[in-house]
Amino acid sequence: TVGLSLEQTKQMSLLVAEKIIAAEPLLSQADRDLGDGDHGLGMARGFTALTKELTENPHDNLRDLYQAAGNALLTTMGGASGVVFGSLFLAGGKTMHGAEFFGSHELSHLLSQSLKDVMSRGGAKPGDKTMIDALHPAAEAAKANIDKPLAESIKAVAAAAEDGKEASKAMIATMGRAKTLGEKTIGLPDAGAISVTIILSTMADFINA
Ligand code: ADP
Ligand code: MG
Ligand code: MG
């Protein structure tokens, strides 16, 4: 197939929101170990607003859908993490002008744009033990699989994010609150990297269902 229709993309995003909201305790615990413990609540608040936006308002095309979803996260999560996770969806709004289907190209462009925006706004880079350590390998996998069918490319992307999240365990945090813990952060995964993994693996499950 050429990819998901607008309606399918919306259903996929609603399933992503459901899984993120259900993971609230897990995400909060991960952030409690390394940060201030509010990541699960922030994500649940953001994805509840995203669900409301997608179910209550009409969206004419993929660009509008992603733009609206990103704004819902940005405005309700607030702070650095609102910018970081809002950018994942806003990047779709930036890259999907005219796209009728969500396919491997759209996936790759979204992830590359999002990685670029998160890095330029937040100043973190791969290896700093942030969500970038899941997003960067995911964007690379999407690029490498851009000419494969979406069902295949999203599987590779989700696997790369999972590997990146696992690799974040060995990293020493150099950003945000976790920075003060230094070497004590070794062995634990970054909370935001877990969120990225949940988002991408839910997309892979939806597309391959
Ligand atoms: P806060 O840090 O404001 O309490 P959250 O707990 O919701 O916000 O989110 C923390 C997550 O956000 C981290 O686990 C990390 O993955 C991500 N994050 C924080 N700062 C940055 C940054 N500058 N660049 C990329 N990701 C970041
Ligand atoms: Mg936090
Ligand atoms: Mg906080």
Image: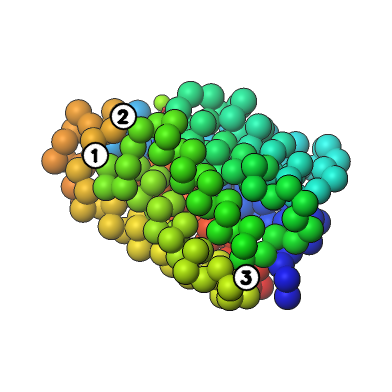
Residue 193 image label: none
Residue 176 image label: 2
Placement of 169 over or under 32, stated as above or below:
below
What amino acid type is highlighted by mark number 1?
Ala
How many other residues sit within 10 Å of disc 2, few (<14), some (14-19) or many (≥20)?
A: some
Placement of 154 over or under 131, stated as above or below:
below
Q: Secondary structure at mark 2?
A: loop
Residue contact between numbered discs 1 and 2, judged by CB atoms under 8 Å: yes
Residue 8 in view (yes/no):
no
Residue under label 1: 173
Q: Residue 188: x and y, percent?
A: 26, 48
- Marked residue nearer the N-terminal end (2 or 3): 3
Residue under label 3: 150
Q: Residue 170: x and y, percent?
A: 21, 53
User: Considering depth in this image, is 16 or 151 the residue closer to the camera?
Assistant: 151
Mark 2 vs ligand 1: CB below 8 Å: yes
Q: Secondary structure at mark 1?
A: loop
What amino acid type is highlighted by mark number 3?
Leu
Q: Nearer the viewer, mark 1 or mark 3?
A: 3
Q: Residue at x 28, y 33 (%)?
A: 175
What amino acid type is highlighted by mark number 2?
Gly
Q: Residue at x 61, y 52 (%)?
A: 16
Q: Residue 87: x and y, percent?
A: 55, 38
Q: Residue at x 49, y 64 (%)?
A: 143
